Each structure stands twice: as C-alpha cells, then as structure tokens.
Image (cartoon, rainbow, N blue to C red):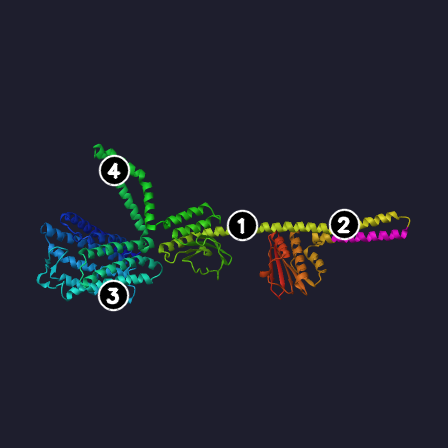
Amino acid sequence: MEARDPERRLARFAWPLAAVWLVAWLTTVALLIANRSAIDTVQDADLSDVILPIGFAIIGTLVASRMPRNPIGWIFLGIAIFGALSGVITMYVFRSTHFGPLPFTDWLAWLHDPMNWLVFPPGLATFFFLLFPDGHVPSARWRRLAWFAALVTAVGFVFLTLQDTIQIGDTPPIPNPLGSIAVIDMEHGAAGTIWLVGIIVILTAMTGTVLRARRSTGELRQQLRWLGFAAALTAVALAALIASFAIGLQPPESAFEAVIVLGYGVAVPTACGIAILKHGLYDLDVVISKTVVYAVLAAFFTAVYLAIVVGVGTAIGSSHNSFLTVLAAATIAVAFNPVRDRAKRFANRLVYGKRASPYEVLSAFSERVGETYSVEDVLPRMAALLGESTGAREATVWLRVGAELRASASWGDGNEPRETLPMADGELPSFVEASKVAAVRHRDELLGALTVTKAPNDPLTGAEDKLVEDLAAQAGLVLRNVRLTEELRANLEELRASRQRLVTAQDGERRRIERNIHDGAQQQLVALAVQARLAENIAGTDPERERELLRGVQQGLQDALEDLRDLARGIYPPLLADQGLVAALEAQVRRSPIPVVVETDGIDRYPQETEAAVYFCVLEALQNVAKYAQASSATVRLEAPADELRFTVRDDGRGFDPSSTGYGTGLQGMSDRLAALGGALAVRSAPGAGTTIGGMLPAGS
C-alpha cells in the first residue's frame, strides 16, 4: 500500500492538468468565435490548435490517471496543454492585431514559438513515437536518438527564445521583448537549419514506429499497427512538403496546416484510440465504458429536462412552472434504469464491438452453469461462449479421460470430431495451432483445458487472454460434474452390459443343463424303461435272460445317478454346501489333467453366493489353464485378509499380452460374476511368463 501511495498522488495531477487544458481550449474557442469577423482563411483560424489537442487530452487524462508511471499519458497531456495554450496566444495576438492593441501581446507572442518547439517537431511529438506504447525506448539505438532529440529541443528552444522578431501566422512581425540580446535570425543563416534537423528527428522517430509495427508480433503488433499506418502516411506527406520546398516549389500555405491537423490531430489520436478500444491497450475499456454511460445519461436527462421544463413551459407560456419541474424529475426517475441499461449496451458495443464485455461473458456463463450440467448442453455452450467472446476462429473444450484429453465440444471452424491427445506425466500436451491454452483445474486436479485459435492477423488481446483464464477458473466445477456424469453413465452402461451378459450366461447354462439332461440322464432312463419292459415280457420264461436284463437296469440306474450327480455339481456342488470351499476345490483339482496345488490361509465358511462365485471362478480359470496355457502345473491360493476373500490361480504356461488380447467369454463371465457381488477381477500375464488370475470379494457379501 505504501508503495502505491506515490503513484496515486502522481495520478491525481492528471485531472488538474486536464482542467488546465479545458480552460485553455475553451478560451481558444471563445477567442476564435470573437475573432470570426476578421478571419479570412483557414490558416487564420489556426484549426491545428483547436482540433489537435482534443484527442490527446482525452487519452492522456485517462492514461495518466490510471497508469501514472507510463510517460505516454503525460506526453499526451503535455501536447494537449501546449497546443491549447498556443491556440490562446495565436487568437490573442490575432485579436490584438485586428481589433486593437491588447496588453502583454509581445510577451505572449514571445512564448508562442518556444512552446510549440517543445511539442513539434523534436519535442513531445518525437518522444511520443519513441516511447509508445509502454513508455520505454525500444533499444539502445533509439535511446541515442532520444538523447539527440532532447539536445535539438534544448538548442532550438534557446534559439527561438532569442530570435529577433516573432511572427504568428499572417500577423505583422513583433519585435522580441528581450531587446538587444535577441539577435538570432531563425529565417536565414545556420540557426535556420535547426528546423530541418528537428523535422529529420521526428521523421526518424516515425519511421521507427513503422519498423517496430512490422517487426513486432502478437498483441504489440496489433497495438502498433494502426499507429504505424498513421505515422507512415503523415511522414510521407510531411516529407513531400519538405521536398517540394527544397526543389523550389511553393505548396499552398494551408498544406502544412492540413498535414498537421489530419496527421497529428486526427490520424494519430484515432490510431491510439483503436489500440485502446480494440486491442486492450492500457486496460482503459472499463473507464471508457463508464465514461460513455455517464455521458449518455447526462445528455439524455439534460435533454428531457430542457424539453419538458423549457420547451413545454415556453409553449404554454409558463417558464417557472413547478409542476413541469416535478414532471421532468418523475420522467427522469422512471426512465433511469431503462436508459442506463441501453447506455451500457451502447458503451459495451462501442468499446468491445460485437463481442460481449468480459463481465457479461462471465455472468452469462454462471447463469448457464446454473441451468444444467448435462454434457450435451453445458460444454457446447461453453465452447460457443468462449469463441464468440474472443472473436476466435475456433474454440474447444477438452475433457481429461484417464491419461488422455478428449475434445468434448468445439465451436467454429473446428466443429468436427477430433482425436484424443495423450498427456505426459499428467501435464497438458502441446497444442500447436492454438492461440491460447488454459488448464482447467479443481482443487489442484487437472480436469481438462480450454483452447482458443484466432486468425494469425488477429492475435489474442490482453483482455481476451484474461477472459479465457477467468472462464477456465470457473469451468473447474463444471468439468468435474461433467466427468462424474460421464463416469456414472459409463458405469451404468457397463452395469447394463454385465447384467445382459449374466442373463445370457444364465440362459446358456439352462440350455446346457437341458441338453445334458436330454442327451444324458433322459436317454439313459428311456433305455432302462425299454429294458424293464423286456424283462417283464420274458419273466418266468427265460430266467437267465431276465437276470441279465435286471443287471443291465441296475447298472443303468447307477450310471444315470452318477450323471445326475455330476450335473448337480455343475449347478451347485453338494460338497461345497456341506464342507465348504476348500474341500470342494480339492475334490475338483484331483480330476485336473495337470498337477494343481491348493494353498489356503485362514479360510472359513462364507455366504453361499460368495463361496459359489469363488468356486466357479477358480474352476473356469483351471479350465482355461488346461485348454490354452500349455502349463505343466498350477497353484490355487485362497486367503482372507481384512474382511475380504481373495483367490489366485497361477500357472507356468506360455502366457499372453492382456492389453492386446482383452477378456474372452470366460474371463468376462468371471469379472461379471465377481462384480455382481461387489468384487473385482485382475489378470496379470506376459508372453513366456505364465498367467496369474486374481479375484477379490467382500467376505461378508
């Protein structure tokens, strides 16, 4: 705060200096009106001192009051004040010459040329072109020109102070009031060359502005481009006038005045205004917007008051009617909010063009976030808002999905599907064509990014850059909600798919059971029924044949019973229900075609569905080992750490690459079976290194 106090005190001087300019300018205008009857030519009107200071005064006051450490604001104010004072002197001397002598005319005339020399050509005008826009000399080479310009300004100031006679416009020459010490002839001799040197200095500075505009890049190029264009035109016109004088031509007397008025008084301030309004120079958009709003309000309410009180009062013949005053006040009160809103829109359109102001953009974004969080709506709106507010050719909202960035919404020329971009170490990848990349974070977690791409000849301004950063700061919660919604949607889709797979597996299992019963036990029982009828038909006639048939029926019943028991084991093994998971698996591995070892650690009894899930997952894994692994042995390990039931099936087979192979029907069925009970499946394998299939279930599920 203490460091900013001197800056604030310095900034306060801007407004008193602006008041000095305004008083001097109004005095110039008043004298011009008073002298109008004697003014015969444009040169007599001295329009350069009337028109030129206006733009410099407005811009200078705004810049100096907000950025007092930047000398550009004070240079603008200096040009405006000296120009207005020069106008006062010119009109005062003109009136003294044409309407009768006025006091102090000679002393005021004595100040005219030295004061103008401080502005043009080697004075403030030169330093304006050297220091614009940031207040620093571009390089050491141009710093030498600045020192030389200061030297020429000082020498010329002394010469003009000591010139023998003073002539302002077409007025008769006025002797220098300093008397005998004023002996320098500025029209002839070596002293006269100071004007040519001054012109060369300012032309060099203007050429430097053109070169900087051509060589600079980005936002600085946009800020200098218009000033460089205005400087080039003015420099060419000024050089042409000087060349015409050098070769003996006599251009019209008003030509030099026109170059000064149109070049320095109109083109240069206009170029600075474009740099300020369009390209965010000096961050004056808010000040200018508010100034326009206040000016519109003041003009409107003044017009309303005059129309009602003066206009209506005059019409009805009552200029002091209190009712009209109350009516005007009521009308102003009712119209205040609508007029203010329209004035704000007009000011924003003037400052920001067709684009909304940054504050409107952030407000609109907050409102839209409050309406919905659907990915189909929020992200496309965000991309459109981002593109429209920055005037971008393309705007994209990227959403982080795992270790990749996915273009979730695009606006503009690039409104087509894009490939995902891989991230490196959790950081954003490079976006080659993007003009601006803003990371979107929420609680230090990278959730995505916003990218803006503008045309090469229209780079991002400082205000637009900050707007993108502000939008990215607000978008963190939005992208988090969108990602949660996407994850929930993906989980729901996976849940539906797993349920569908379970239903399909159940249907397939029922068909298998039906087929096994039809092809196995049912056919055996039919054959037994046939044998029983044959035995009945020969009963008492052929005892030996009868006994043979009965033995066949007995053996067939035993085989059918075994088939039914095997079928029952496939549905739910009785041994699993009676003795638990370890006993059931040990009974099964004894039938395995390869050696299998069962290891247990703290295994107890668990809910029926939990034991069944582990049992059938282990059997499926062992079947895969026997069919595909080409293994010589396998190990089944069961353990129960911390309220969990875990199993591992490890083999020494050929292995495979899980990332390229993916889950087959068997592995997917195991994963679905475990997921239905809140568990998970993990597969680790590599070519030539065997395979390990692990699963986990909550022990209490």
Which residue is most to the right? 541
Other residues around mark 2 within 10 Å, as few (<14) / some (14–19) / many (≥20):
some
User: Residue 145: which disc?
Assistant: 3
The answer, for residue 363, to whether it is visible in the render is: yes
Residue highlighted by disc 2? 522
Q: CA distance from mark 1 to mark 4?
A: 65 Å
Between 646 and 282, the residue placed more toward the observer is 282
Which of the numbered marks, if any, corresponds to residue 489? 1
Indicate left or right for 537 with 324 as reference: right
Q: Which stretch appears magenta?
A: 542-565
**Where, by quadrant of the figure, is residue 598 drawn?**
bottom right
Label pair 1/2, CB-CB below 8 angstroms: no
- Whether residue 449 is in magenta: the answer is no
Q: Secondary structure at mark 1?
A: helix
Label 3 vs label 1: CA separation? 68 Å
Please say if 517 is above or below 649: above
Q: Amino acid at mark 2?
A: Gln
